[in-house]
Amino acid sequence: MKDVYESRNCYRKATHMYPAPSHSQKKVKVLSKGKPEFERVYLKALQRSNRMVSDAELQELPHTFFYTMHKPAWEKRAYISEKLIQYLSKKKEPFKAIDLGCGNGWLAARMAEIQQSTIAAVDINLIELEQAARVFQHKNLELYYGDIFKNILSKGEWDYIILFDTISYFPNLVKLINRCREYLTAEGEIHILESPFYQEREIEKAQKETEAFYKELRSEEMMEFHHFHSKQDIQDFDYTYLYQPSRLKSIFNKKASNYPWIRITN
């Protein structure tokens, strides 16, 4: 785990204003081995793209009280995440949800504000999970460091699995969805948000644009971990579009998401 510790030191150096964690704060539960090479490369790209946030900023996300180059993107995340919270809030009975690829836990924390919810925030990025542990103290929110393809949580017990801006880090979307379904109840749902789906003819162009982006960041290694999925990847599942972007929506609402919201039922 040498790479993880090096990344952690780099992260804390860049965020020296963070308060030291107290012993009373929620801890991250380590459930399986992670992927230290991915974690090292991802954290480097995160830092070089100025996407790390302070604890104070994290408490406010998805709303930002500072103007940053990423403010427009966060406004779009705020727009679609609010719709997700409204959707989940309509469930009258208690529910359990997994925020898979939760990052620093901002969305999981918002979900935990829904009464009678139990939220598991799962990632293989220990640095951001530790930040979530410092910032969020919800009793119904647990933070887990673990690989979803390991037996890290109880199967057949979860009502929702949320994949928010995360499927690009999984090479095989069909395999991921089938794995998630094992964790769901019979009536469970997978929700995919803030993730691009390409036509087959668009993938080569998207790859070149993403490669140029990482090259500019001097984080070319991320291309090994960035994957491109087409709409055909979900064609064999029972799915529904709960939101679809359009040019008209983007004209009249600059905060409208650029990506679809897809619900897959078990």
Image: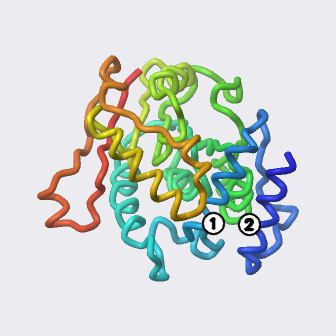
Q: Which residue is mark 1?
A: 47
Residue toward you, 131 or 22: 131
Residue shown at the point (33%, 60%) measured from the top left? 79
> Looking at numbered disc 2 in the image, what kind of residue is underneath it?
Tyr
Position of residue 50 measured from the top left corner of the image (x, y, whole percent): 56, 71
Label annotation for residue 265: none
Horizontal side of residue 219 vs 36, given as left or right: left
Q: Distance between the Cα atoms at labels 2 and 1? A: 8 Å
Furthest-left residue in view? 248
Task: Sort mark 1 into few (<14), some (14-19) or many (20+) by Cα contacts within 10 Å.
Answer: some
What secondary structure is marked by label 2? helix
Residue toward you, 183 or 90: 183
> In the rendered view, how is the structure colored?
rainbow
Q: Quadrant of the N terminus?
A: top right
Position of residue 46 measured from the top left corner of the image (x, y, whole percent): 60, 61
Check the image and report above or below for 118 versus 13: above
Q: Quadrant of the C terminus?
A: top left
What secondary structure is marked by label 1? helix
Residue shown at the point (55%, 59%) measured from the top left? 106
Position of residue 242 measured from the top left corner of the image (x, y, whole percent): 26, 40
Mark closest to the chain's N terminus, 2 or 1: 2
Residue shown at the point (14%, 66%) measured from the top left? 252
Residue toward you, 263 or 171: 171
Horizontal side of residue 108 vs 188, given as left or right: right
Q: Which residue is mark 2?
A: 11
> Looking at numbered disc 1 in the image, what kind of residue is underneath it?
Gln
Residue toward you, 228 or 139: 228
Horizontal side of residue 207 vs 49, given as left or right: left
Check the image and report above or below for 67 versus 83: below
Q: Is residue 69 visible?
A: yes
